[in-house]
Each structure stands twice: as structure tokens, then as C-alpha cells.
Image: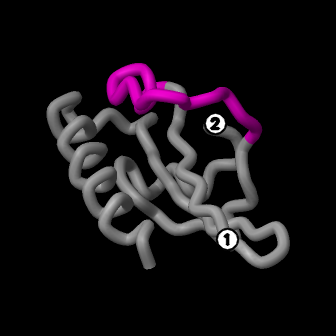
Amino acid sequence: MLANEALSDLKAYLLNVYEVEGKTESMLAIYRHESSGLHCNLIVYLTTELQRTAMLEDAVSCNIPPLSDSGFLAGNEARMSESKWC
């Protein structure tokens, strides 16, 4: 997939941000594949705390996505079990 390389680069960047910030417990990034018809979109979700430091372009505030079909990307993986973080 074309997204694999970009996702790998983003993961490396976010892991670096997480580590530089002292592995702040509130930081988490996850990803999901969402489809609408023929094509699939890869969506990355960050906690507000991680986005404040990572400063990714074109990020928008959102509601927490369904975690049951989300994959861990970076940050504090324990946050995936919390019901509110986005």
C-alpha cells in the first residue's frame, strides 16, 4: 500500500515527539482504515496533547473514533483502553 511508507515515517516522528516530551501519559496516536465505496482512507487520530507538540498540518479536532478496529501508532498505548481522549 502507498500509505505504509508515509505511516512508517509518521510513526517515527510521533515516537520521537513522545520520547522528547518525556513519554507524557496523555499522548497517544492511533490509526484506522475507513472506506466509502471503492477506496479506503487511512485516518490518524492524535490526542490533543500529542498534536500540541507534534503540530501536524491540517489536523482537525474530532470525537474519539471506535477503538475496537483501531491500531496503535505511537505514545502511551494504555490510553487506548480509556473512553475519552481525543
Q: Is residue 34 left or right of residue 17?
A: right
Residue 31, quarter of the rendered image: bottom right
| Placement of the C terminus among the 4 image quadrants | top right
Q: Is residue 8 magenta?
A: no
Instruction: Determine which of the numbered discs, if any, sits on residue 86 in the image.
Output: 2
Q: Which residues are magenta?
A: 49-63
The quadrant of the picture occupied by the N terminus is: bottom left
Q: Residue at x 45, y 35 (%)?
A: 26
**Identity, as a three-letter code, of the amino acid under mark 2:** Cys
In the structure shown, which secondary structural element does the residue marked by tag 1 occupy? Answer: strand
Residue furthest to the right in view is 37
Q: Which of the two discs, 2 and 1, sits closer to the camera?
A: 1
Task: Give amino acid for label 1.
Answer: Cys
Across and down, in percent, residue 22 comes to: 19, 32
Q: Position of residue 49 (x, y in %)?
A: 45, 26
Residue bearing mark 1: 40
State how many labels appear. Answer: 2
- The x and y percentages for residue 34 are 71, 66
Q: Please name the residue shown 51% across and 55% down the image.
A: 30
Furthest residue toward top:
52
